[in-house]
Image (cartoon, rainbow, N blue to C red):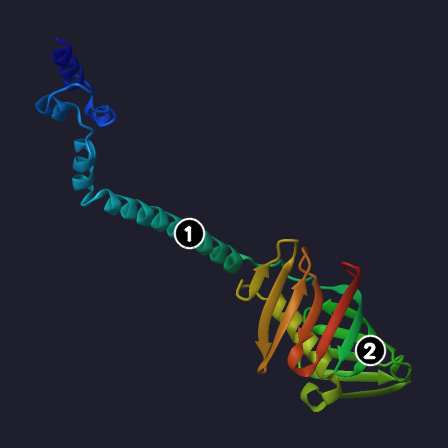
Amino acid sequence: MLIRNQKYCFENLPRRLRHRCPPTGGLSDGNRKLVEPVKNPPCREEGAKRQGGSPKAMLVNAIKCRLRKRCLCLLMIALLLTLTSCAAKAPPPPASFSAQAEISFGEKQFSAAVQQQAPGALILCFTAPEELAGLELALEGETAALHFKGLQHTQPLGAMPGASFAAFLNRVLLRLAQPGGEGFTRVPKGGWTFRGEINGLRYSAKIAEDGSLERLEVPAIGLRIDIIYQSSAL
């Protein structure tokens, strides 16, 4: 009766629990087979077959699935960041402004008051070094005009090598005023950076939140211009 009850209880156990039942002592060999632990439960074998292989293959497939999902998420995040940075466009710089510029050009240092009355019309009044104090350089289009101690001279911009950094600054300001978001990158702390090229010279510009140019760097010619704005408009 005891053996029959044990056999009845075991047969009514769910398959997933049968392998946990230890062999019962005192049973005959025929009855002991009924209660021997199942090495590989049928449910696992069936699941493995549905998944296309052994439990090891199921584990490999699960790992691959997780890796695919993670790679897809990373790809979507990278694509989103790329589209965001490409679509970023700083506001155009002020059409007119007044500022102070600190200029490093090679080994030389200059200070100048900068005024722009309209895009493309830039005036630099040098305050340092001492020998250039009072020199005024006015740029408009491709023409440069020098005013110094009552003397005035006007000539094409390309024929005035000493005004090259001022011309570069003027062209960058014109480029920043043009529509189009190419070259702009949003800075997490605020503002933008802009990278471009003029006459084969690569440059980078730091732009404030309102679109004002704060710094211009041209590594190939050792040019750096830092601009401190006095007011947003004249």
Q: Residue at x 36, y 50 (%)?
A: 67
Q: State the separation of the CA atoms marked 2 and 1.
A: 48 Å
82 is higher (above) or lower (below) than 4 = below
Name, please, the residue furthest toward the left. Answer: 30
Q: Residue furthest bottom?
A: 159
Q: Is residue 153 left or right of residue 140?
A: right
How far from the left and from the top, in percent, is residue 147?
A: 84, 83
Q: Residue 160's x, y, as percent?
A: 73, 89
Residue 2: x and y in percent read 15, 10
Q: Which mark is residue 76?
A: 1
* Residue of label 2: 110
Residue 14 vs residue 209, the one in the foreground: 14
In the picture provided, is 62 more to the left or to the right than 181?
A: left
For marks 2 and 1, the one nearer the N-term is 1
Q: Amino acid at mark 1?
A: Met
- Kindly tell me whether residue 126 is visible in this rendering: yes
Q: Quadrant of residue 166?
A: bottom right
- Choose top left, top right, bottom left or bottom right for residue 75: bottom left
In the rendered view, does 50 fall on the left or right side of 155?
Answer: left
How packed mark 1 is, by other alpha carbons closer than 10 Å (few <14, some 14-19, many 20 or more), is few
- The amino acid type of the residue labelled 2 equals Phe
